Image (cartoon, rainbow, N blue to C red):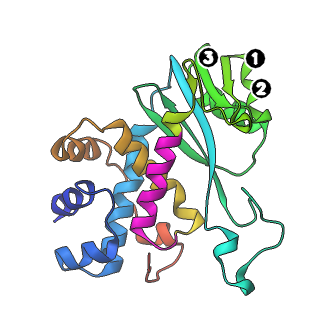
């Protein structure tokens, strides 16, 4: 059952826990928990090796647009990427290589510098947009940027198209999985899509074996939700 659920999940771009529960005849809560147990172990492998050479970096926001919400659910002063109603995530990806991504709570240069040092080999080339917080990267890296405000998205070999494609795939994927995702679970979904990206040339069997190599401590349902309850997403 475990392999069949894994194969069903990774053979498609996205599959909801509700659909899996129907496919393998278990409760929706059980299917949802199975998926999150898989996501929990993907992070062990996906974040172990530093990125190097040429690396693109970009941040984005996860969360519905305020203009699409009912009037009584809108929050004032939340235009653009507001942390009041959205979760900020940052991603890094090598040209023709691996990716890393994580949730960030503070959006500033100090956070960017710490994340780069922890995930990208010092001395590498980092490509970004012209957001001011990325300027700190010039101290330890060869930093180049593209100015999107001028309507430019590529300058010779400088662009962030690869990481932006990763974000587009991630957002399409989570839309297909659920109508909404709780903030505390977003990093697990990131782990899953990073794992997919880093194993894009693997078949389902090899991906399953890679997951098995990373299994360790048992992941309890209570640790996932904080209390015993039925999930709807």
Q: Quadrant of the C terminus?
A: bottom left
Q: Which residue is mark 1?
A: 139
CA gap between label 3 and label 1 equals 10 Å
Q: Is residue 35 magenta?
A: no
Q: Earlier in the sequence, mark 3 or mark 2?
A: 3
Q: Which residue is mark 3?
A: 122
Q: Is residue 169 magenta?
A: yes
Q: Residue at x 47, y 80 (%)?
A: 228
Is residue 167 shown left or right of residue 218? right
Local packing at callout 3 (Cα closer than 10 Å; few below 14, some 14-19, many 20+) is some
Q: Which mark is in front, 3 or 2?
A: 2
Local packing at callout 2 (Cα closer than 10 Å; few below 14, some 14-19, many 20+) is some
Q: Secondary structure at mark 3?
A: loop
Q: Which residues, given as a range, are shown in magenta?
A: 164-180
Give yes or no for contact between labels 1 and 2 (Cβ–Cβ under 8 Å). yes
Comparing 207 with 126, the one in front is 126
Q: Quadrant of residue 12?
A: bottom left
Comparing 217 with 69, the one in front is 69
Residue 65 on image: x %, y %? 65, 67
Q: Which residue is mark 2?
A: 136
Residue 119 in view in this figure: no
Is 146 located above or below residue 226 in the figure?
above
């Amino acid at each position: 059952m475990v392999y069949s659920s894994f194969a069903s999940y990774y053979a498609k771009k996205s599959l909801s826990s509700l659909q899996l529960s129907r496919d393998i005849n278990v409760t929706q809560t059980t299917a949802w928990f199975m998926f999150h147990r898989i996501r929990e172990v993907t992070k062990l492998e996906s974040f172990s090796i530093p990125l190097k050479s040429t690396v693109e970096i970009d941040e984005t926001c996860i969360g519905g647009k305020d203009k699409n919400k009912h009037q009584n659910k809108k929050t004032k002063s939340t235009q653009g990427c507001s942390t009041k109603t959205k979760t900020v995530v940052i991603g890094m990806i090598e040209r023709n290589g691996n990716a890393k991504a994580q949730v960030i709570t503070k959006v500033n240069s100090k956070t960017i510098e710490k994340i780069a040092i922890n995930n990208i080999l010092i001395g590498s080339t980092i490509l970004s947009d012209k957001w001011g917080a990325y300027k700190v990267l010039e101290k330890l890296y060869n930093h180049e940027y593209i100015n999107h405000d001028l309507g430019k998205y590529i300058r010779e070999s400088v662009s962030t198209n690869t990481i932006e494609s990763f974000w587009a795939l991630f957002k399409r994927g989570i839309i297909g999985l659920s109508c909404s995702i709780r903030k505390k679970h977003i990093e697990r979904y990131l782990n899953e899509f990073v794992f997919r990206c880093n194993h894009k040339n693997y078949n389902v069997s090899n991906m399953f074996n890679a997951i098995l190599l990373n299994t360790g401590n048992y992941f309890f349902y209570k640790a996932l939700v904080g209390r015993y309850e039925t999930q709807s997403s």
